[in-house]
Amino acid sequence: MNVKNFLQLPITKAFTVVAGRNGLHKPVHNVEILDFEFSPDIQTVRETVFTPNSVVLSSLLFAKQEPEYLLNAVKNLIQLDASALAYKPVIYKDLPEEVLALADEHHFPILRFGGDEFFEKIILETMAFAKTQDYTFFLATIMGRLINEELSDEQIKSFLQQMNKTFEKYVFVANVQMNQMVNTQWMENFFNLEPLLKSGIICTFKKSMFILMTHPSQQLQFEKLLNEWLTMYDIATENLFIGYSNVHLTEVELHLAVREAYFSRIMAEIYTISTYHYKNLASDCLLIELHRKDAHFAMDYVNNYLGPLLENKVDPDLMNTAITFVIKKGNIKEVAVAHFCHPNTIRYRMTKIRQLIAPLENDYVFYERLSTAVKLYLLHSKVEE
């Protein structure tokens, strides 16, 4: 959590930044209250009176008759590595210019309350948000490990226990990604589905959403159920890419379900298909496993074979044409439509591509190798995103 996140809480949305706007990235680990700690009338002040990375709340009562005390207070907060000062405008609506200038110079955010917000409620909401963020980060980390690592049964059981949920025998997983041309607020809508999950979780991973549902029966029609929920909550699906896993045993095959859904969604993006099931990936499963287990080796193959296209800055259309040619399974007419040109233009480009990368290969070998290299290239690009 940082100061910018702090300002997005429901209780702080009316706050305004009066100084130190360039410091909104500072982390927030705590929220504390300043009463009279920096008043000269108090003889002994602990150096650690405020912990680092804290947002300090104050009504500035200690400087009621002495505005010069404010400058000293801000100096001390900066020295103590506080993240920000948020003050209630009951004594001072506006702070002295020298205080604001000091805060700007040190990129120390000073925030003004928007109304009569209670200190205690601000602290409670901040801590609740931080706890939620910690759990969100934990789940995203678990998803990453399930996708990328070879895990033992004991590790999977440990993950399930740490999630602190009730899970049934079989697990069904969907991974969802919104078309990147659309705004990034779409994820919030999916958390509305969480109360419908009797046993499962919804979490984010990078720019996608995971929906894990467990059930006593492997006959559950998960895709149909999910579509009904999306309709119920009026979540538009036309800009979504969804990948579905096979059904798996929760306690020993959770990693397979998560992995299958994730890569199915990536292949859905590559093929620009709204939904893709892992069971329909065919030989693409081999490319996925090759890249997952040895991405360096896979990309060496891509660079060696497609190098002349990737390095060709004179005619970048060649690489784009090769990609579309593979995605359209070699259908020249469909490739031409996608590139808004005549089929003969595509034939000319494909001849040029072949001359650059495989002049001695026959048609079958050329398409097979081109298809493999292009899919690995796209797969790597999506994973890196």
Image: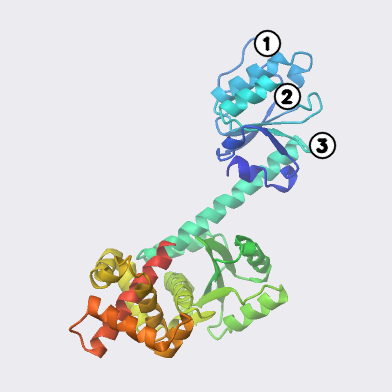
**Amino acid beneath label 2:** Leu
The reply to whether residue 193 is in sight is yes
Residue at 34% in and 73% down: 376
Residue 237 is situated, as x and y percent measured from the top left of the image, at: 62, 76
Which residue is the extreme one toward the left? 360
Residue pointed to by mark 2: 95
Residues marked 3 and 1 touching at CB (< 8 Å): no
**Amino acid beneath label 1:** Pro
The reply to whether residue 288 is in sight is no
Residue at 61% in and 26% down: 103
Q: Classify 10 Å Cα crowding around label 2: few (below 14), some (14-19), many (20 and above).
A: some
Q: Which mark is residue 258?
A: none
Left or right of 356? Residue 116 is right
Quarter assignment of residue 355: bottom left
Q: CA distance from mark 3 to mark 1?
A: 28 Å
Q: Nearer the viewer, residue 216 or 205?
A: 205
